[in-house]
Amino acid sequence: MKVRKLNHKTIPASDKNRAYRFWRDVFDLPQVGLQSERRLAVDHQELFFIDGLAENDFELLVRDHESTLQQHFRNNFVPILKREERFGHKVALTVQDSEGNLVVIEGNLD
C-alpha cells in the first residue's frame, strides 16, 4: 500500500507487538530509526501504540486503486467490512486491525 496520511498517530492496543506487526505488514508502513526501537511512521510522523480500548475513527489515505487494495487485503487475510463510494472518484474500505480498531482506507476507484 502507498500510504499518504493517517488522521490519528496514537493507536490503542491490548498487544502492542501484535498491533505493530499488523500495521507494518498489512498497511505497509515503513520503520524509522534503529531496528531495535520498533517505530513506524506515516507522512514523516511517528505512530505510537498505547494501552487502551479499540476505537472506530481511524482514516488512512492511500494512493492505491480499489482492485489493488482488495487484492492486498485478501493476501493478508483481512476481511473488508464495508465499502463506500465517495466524492472525487474515491472509495472507502473499512477493515478491523488486530486490536479491534476500525480503520477506513480511502483510495481511488478503478
Image (tube, helix red, strand yellow):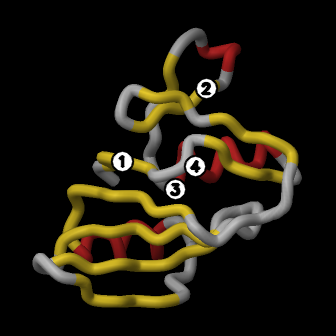
**What residue is shown with label 1?**
5
Expressed as whole percent of the image width and height from the top left, the position of residue 18 reads 76, 48
Looking at the figure, which quarter contains the C terminus?
A: bottom left
User: Which is more foreground, mark 1 or mark 2?
Assistant: 1
Type of the residue with mark 4: Trp
The CA span between labels 2 and 4 is 11 Å
User: Which badge, 3 or 2, comes first in the chain's sequence?
Assistant: 3
The CA span between labels 4 and 3 is 6 Å
**What residue is shown with label 4?**
23
User: Which is more foreground, mark 3 or mark 2?
Assistant: 2
User: Which badge, 2 or 4, comes first in the chain's sequence?
Assistant: 4
Type of the residue with mark 2: Arg
Q: Are marks 2 and 4 in contact (CB under 8 Å)?
A: no
Expressed as whole percent of the image width and height from the top left, the position of residue 68 reads 26, 69
Q: What is the crowding at mark 4: few (fewer than 14 residues within 10 Å), some, or many (at least 20)?
A: some
Q: Is residue 48 above or below residue 74?
A: above
Q: What is the crowding at mark 3: few (fewer than 14 residues within 10 Å), some, or many (at least 20)?
A: some
**What residue is shown with label 3?**
26
Type of the residue with mark 1: Lys
Type of the residue with mark 3: Val
Q: Residue at x 65, y 43 (%)?
A: 10
Please tell me which residue lies in front, 7 or 69: 7
Q: Would you say 10 lies left or right of 63 here?
A: right
Most distant residue in the top direction:
34
Is label 3 in a helix, a strand or a loop? helix
Is label 2 in a helix, a strand or a loop? strand
Mark identifier at residue 39: 2
Q: Is residue 86 above or below residue 64?
A: below
Please tell me which residue lies in front, 13 or 20: 13
Looking at the figure, which quarter contains the N terminus?
A: bottom left
The CA span between labels 1 and 3 is 15 Å
Q: Would you say 98 lies left or right of 60 here?
A: right
